[in-house]
């Protein structure tokens, strides 16, 4: 995919070369944005298959990472999110929680290295991700930006902003002001990182208008892999907090549970955050196949109001803690490592 306009050439050959029309084409290259953008040109020219033609090969999940560290630490089988709120789910959590301390240790490693091969290798060999590895991650992202005539400096500021506000609402006007660009340009930079699977833009759920995204409300920005959060730090910028990184890992896990994630990665249409008219907020709202509210309190004190917000709005849900387990109420309290495993 280094060759400019490679997609148009393939389309031309598909239309005019009979032998090529029957061929299978394997594309290699590191530009995720380029591959995603080419899909429109290939529409109707890709043949038919009984399984989806697109595959999104994402980094290791936390469950994968914990399995690699110790297969016995992860229970089988993996349960859908809504099933955790059933008696069978409670029983599974009760057993899995016996390994809470071990899973929390692995989670502490995972939120620093993420699931990409090079950072994971660093973590397993040296107990930390090397600065040189993080620099390579940055070079990969900035290469995509340069291909689209975007500024490295502005991209750096966007990543720094995402790290500082990880899990917090980001208004388009504020983002444009901080990046010193227009609102459409700020949105374009977000789209560049999202199309490269490096950024997740989560919308507030609009309960008044067909339960879709509230397009005029601020969004929450999460990173597509936890390792990307280290990039601003090596460039002289801020570092994320532990609680924010765990919330980011939860966002990725909930997104990955959606089988249509390839089309919805940049702007998920089954995962939202929720905010009431009086300002109460719930971190995540999974809407399909069943509606489940999830609140992350890994590094914060839980209060009765946190539980009340979930029960009043949705009747049930999941509260994510660091090590506490509570199975006797409508809102399940489960350790982050156990939930992600």
Image (cartoon, rainbow, N blue to C red):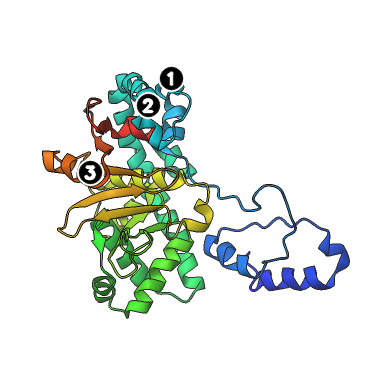
Q: Earlier in the sequence, mark 1 or mark 3?
A: 1
Residue 255 is labelled as none
- For label 1, the residue is 72
Q: Quadrant of residue 160?
A: bottom left
> Front-most of 299 and 130?
299
- Secondary element at tag 1: helix
Q: Is residue 251 above or below residue 320?
A: below
Check if mark 2's residue and mark 1's residue have beta carbons within 8 Å.
no
Q: Residue at x 45, y 38 (%)?
A: 121
Q: Residue at x 65, y 73 (%)?
A: 5
Q: Position of residue 191 (x, y in %)?
A: 43, 67
Q: Is residue 267 left or right of residue 313?
A: right
- Secondary element at tag 2: helix
Q: Residue at x 76, y 73 (%)?
A: 12
- For label 2, the residue is 89
How dense is the environment of label 2, judged by Cα within 10 Å: few (below 14), some, or many (20 and up)? some
- For label 3, the residue is 310
Q: Earlier in the sequence, mark 2 or mark 3?
A: 2
Q: Quadrant of residue 107?
A: top left
Screen quadrant of the C terminus:
top left
Residue pushed farthest right?
19
């Amino acid at each position: 995919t280094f060759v400019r306009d490679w997609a148009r050439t393939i389309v031309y050959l598909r239309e005019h070369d009979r032998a090529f029309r029957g061929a299978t084409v394997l594309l290699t290259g590191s530009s995720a944005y380029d591959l995603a953008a080419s899909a429109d040109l290939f529409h109707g020219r890709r043949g038919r298959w009984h399984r989806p033609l697109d595959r999104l090969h994402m980094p290791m999940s936390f469950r994968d990472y914990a399995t690699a560290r110790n297969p016995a630490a992860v229970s089988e089988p993996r349960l859908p999110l809504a099933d955790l709120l059933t008696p069978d789910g409670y029983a599974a959590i009760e057993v899995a929680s016996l390994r809470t301390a071990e899973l929390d240790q692995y989670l502490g490693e995972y939120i620093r290295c993420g699931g990409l091969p090079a950072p994971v290798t660093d973590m397993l060999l040296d107990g930390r991700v090397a600065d040189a590895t993080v620099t390579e991650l940055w070079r990969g992202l900035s290469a995509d930006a340069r291909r689209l005539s975007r500024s490295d400096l502005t991209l750096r500021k966007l990543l720094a902003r995402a790290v500082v506000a990880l899990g917090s609402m980001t208004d388009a006007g504020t983002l444009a002001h901080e990046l010193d660009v227009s609102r459409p340009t700020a949105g374009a930079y977000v789209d560049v990182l999202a199309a490269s699977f490096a950024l997740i833009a989560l919308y507030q759920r609009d309960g008044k208008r067909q339960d879709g995204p509230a397009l005029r409300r601020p969004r929450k920005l999460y990173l597509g892999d936890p390792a990307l959060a280290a990039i601003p730090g090596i460039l002289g910028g801020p570092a994320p907090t532990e609680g924010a990184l765990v919330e980011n890992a939860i966002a990725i896990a909930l997104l990955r549970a959606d089988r249509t994630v390839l089309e919805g990665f940049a702007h998920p249409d089954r995962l939202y955050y929720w905010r009431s008219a009086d300002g109460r907020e719930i971190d995540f709202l999974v809407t399909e196949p069943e509606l489940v509210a999830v609140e992350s309190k890994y590094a914060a004190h839980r209060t009765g109001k946190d539980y009340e917000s979930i029960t009043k709005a949705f009747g049930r849900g999941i509260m994510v803690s660091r090590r506490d387990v509570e199975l006797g109420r409508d809102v399940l309290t489960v350790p982050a490592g156990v939930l992600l495993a």
